[in-house]
């Protein structure tokens, strides 16, 4: 069995706490605290402590799904994006651009969040929010 401990940062928010990701044969087995990290000094919040549990969780969403009545049907990325595009266009055409709202993610990169606000503004609204704007 090949084991490794890889220096990384917690993926859950922009604070960027340091941690070590432990692996065995290429699969994540757990984490260790990075005591010398300048931001977190070896500490992680509850989200950070559980951050790697999701990687192999059976509820993890691995592909797009679309609601059909009370069920969710698996669709392709093209189908999902076409649906989102059609619905955004419909709302904008019938209710105006300020009927749209965009919630960005602290788990996305700065570049992804930049593009996300750009999309919102291209559709004519400044209704953009983010959980980290406190
Ligand atoms: S451990 Fe908590 S505070 Fe630190 S980066 Fe992760 S989510 Fe943010």
Image (cartoon, rainbow, N blue to C red):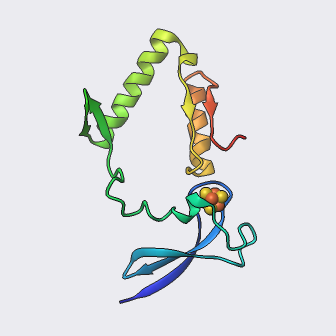
Residue nearest the viewer, comparing 18 with 117 = 18
Q: Position of residue 3 (x, y in %)?
A: 43, 86
The correct choice, above or below, for 79 with respect to 122 in the image is: below
Residue at x 45% of width, y 17% of height: 91
Residue 39 image position (x, y, % from top left): 74, 66
Q: Residue at x 56, y 58 (%)?
A: 47
Q: Quadrant of the C terminus?
A: top right
Hey, which quadrant is residue 90 in on the image? top left
17 to the left or right of 49: right
**Which of the image's four quarters has the N terminus?**
bottom left
Residue 127 lies, with reference to residue 14, above or below; the image says above
Q: Nearer the viewer, residue 49 or 76?
A: 49
In the displayed structure, 132 sits above or below 14; it is: above
Q: Residue at x 31, y 57 (%)?
A: 58
Q: Is residue 1 found left or right of 49 in the rendered image?
A: left
Q: Position of residue 60 (x, y in %)?
A: 36, 53
For this view, does 86 lie left or right of residue 49? Answer: left
Instruction: Please say if 100 is above or below 72.
Output: above
Which residue corresponds to the image point at 67% horizontal and 44% vertical from the top-left?
132
Ligand number 1: quarter of image: bottom right
């Amino acid at each position: 069995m090949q084991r490794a401990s890889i220096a990384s940062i917690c993926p859950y928010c922009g604070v960027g706490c340091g941690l070590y990701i432990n692996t065995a044969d290429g699969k994540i087995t757990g984490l260790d605290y990075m005591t010398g990290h300048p931001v977190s000094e070896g500490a992680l919040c509850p989200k950070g402590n559980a951050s790697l549990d999701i990687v192999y969780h059976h509820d993890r969403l691995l592909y797009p799904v679309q609601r059909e009545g009370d069920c969710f049907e698996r669709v392709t990325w093209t189908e999902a994006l076409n649906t989102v595009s059609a619905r955004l266009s419909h709302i904008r055409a019938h209710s105006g651009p300020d009927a749209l709202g965009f919630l960005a993610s602290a788990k996305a990169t700065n570049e992804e969040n930049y593009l996300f606000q750009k999309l919102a503004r291209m559709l004519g609204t400044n209704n953009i929010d983010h959980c980290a704007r406190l």
